[in-house]
């Protein structure tokens, strides 16, 4: 099973942190705006579905880069592109662009340990397309190179699996500690429309008979919120070039109608933990 949205945030955020500028004032600001690509791979320990109390270890690919001022992030099962060109200098960073994501939630019933949830049947992979807008500022707290960003994303299923949308507000803070180390903190939430809630967290009468879980109809609203921390350390070179080790972790909490679903309240857990560790290389 590939990672969910939350693990995508972690590894993508970690790669963002390791691609950050060094914290020495004598470094030339132009270095921040050169073409650069960072690729990485790691492993993540995560719930087998969002709301599960069973965990799996899975590989996570990731890449982040900027070509001629246009940025992109590939994190697990999600790809986003910033179509607003970055400009040199300590200016506000306006962000906007497309997002594409594959949603594997409940996509492989054979990997689910809980026989009640397995009896509900697997869901097809959803293809979610959308976009995001955001604003960021460098030189906020600790150095001329730390960065605070606020974004709002929206994705809609175009494959007919849940035929609905997900809103994702988030706030991130990244700070280089030296030429070799960087850390980051973030918070995010997922707000889902009715089709998503009913597809993944409702239990029909037939499913109730098959699984033993009570009948339940989930409604739209806040699905979960997440708090996380990430970091990186250069093993060769520095944050702008060479091999890095990256690691991150989150705590999340299922909420609203989703948290009251039998898949969470009876067969799973509202508390959701996730951890990632891996290696990356910056060209």
Image (cartoon, helix red, strand yellow):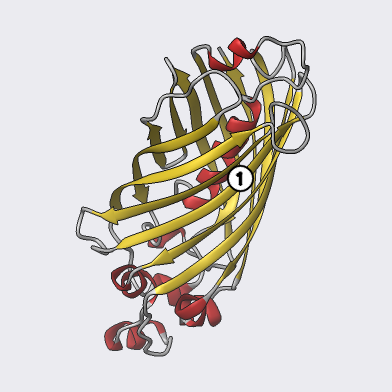
Is 137 displayed left or right of 221 in the figure? Answer: right
Residue under the point 36% across and 57% down: 107
User: What residue do we see at 64% from left, 14% from top?
Assistant: 29
Q: Please report the residue visible at 53 percent of the width from the left and 66 percent of the height from the top.
A: 224
Q: Is residue 158 above or below residue 196?
A: above
The number of callouts visible is 1
The location of residue 135, given as percent across then percent down, is 50, 41
Q: Nearer the viewer, residue 159 or 92?
A: 92
Task: Provide the residue designation for mark 1.
Answer: 172
Mark 1 burial class by Cα count in 10 Å: few <14, some 14-19, many 20+: some
| Residue 125 visible in the snapshot | no
Observer able to see residue 167: yes
In depth, the one of 55 and 8 nearer the eye is: 8
Horizontal relation, residue 109 to residue 254: left or right: left
- Looking at the rendered image, the quarter that the C terminus falls into is top right
Taking 211 as reference, is 265 left or right? right
Q: Position of residue 46 (x, y in %)?
A: 58, 54
Q: Nearer the viewer, residue 260 or 180?
A: 180
Quadrant assignment, res 241: top right
Foreground: 184 or 3?
184
Q: Is residue 28 above or below residue 69?
A: above
Q: Position of residue 232 (x, y in %)?
A: 71, 31
Does dot 1 land on a helix, a strand or a loop?
A: strand
Q: Position of residue 282 (x, y in %)?
A: 58, 17
Asked which quadrant contains residue 21, the reply is top right
């Amino acid at each position: 099973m590939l990672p969910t949205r939350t693990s995508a945030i972690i590894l993508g955020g970690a790669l963002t942190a390791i691609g950050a500028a060094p914290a020495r004032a004598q470094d030339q600001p132009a270095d921040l705006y050169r073409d650069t690509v960072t690729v990485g791979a790691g492993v993540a320990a995560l719930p087998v579905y969002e709301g599960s109390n069973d965990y799996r270890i899975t590989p996570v690919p990731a890449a982040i880069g900027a070509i001629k001022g246009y940025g992109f992030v590939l994190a697990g099962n999600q790809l986003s592109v910033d179509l607003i060109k970055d400009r040199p200098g300590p200016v506000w960073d306006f962000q906007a662009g497309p997002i594409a994501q594959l949603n594997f939630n409940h996509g492989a019933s054979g990997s689910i340990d809980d026989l009640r949830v397995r009896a509900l049947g697997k869901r097809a992979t959803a293809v979610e397309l959308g976009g995001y807008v955001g604003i960021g500022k460098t030189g906020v707290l600790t150095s001329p190179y730390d960065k605070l960003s606020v974004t709002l994303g929206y994705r809609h299923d175009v494959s007919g699996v849940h035929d609905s949308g997900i809103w994702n507000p988030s706030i991130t803070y990244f700070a280089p500690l030296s030429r070799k180390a960087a850390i980051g903190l973030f918070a995010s939430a997922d707000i889902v429309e009715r089709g998503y809630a009913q597809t993944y967290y409702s239990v029909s009468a037939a499913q109730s008979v098959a699984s033993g879980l009570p009948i339940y109809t989930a409604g739209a609203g806040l699905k979960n919120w997440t708090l996380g921390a990430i970091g990186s350390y250069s093993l060769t070179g520095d944050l702008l070039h060479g091999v890095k080790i990256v690691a991150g972790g989150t705590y999340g909490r299922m909420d609203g109608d989703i948290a009251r679903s039998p898949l969470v309240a009876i067969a799973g857990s509202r508390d959701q933990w996730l951890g990632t560790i891996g290696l990356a290389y910056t060209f």
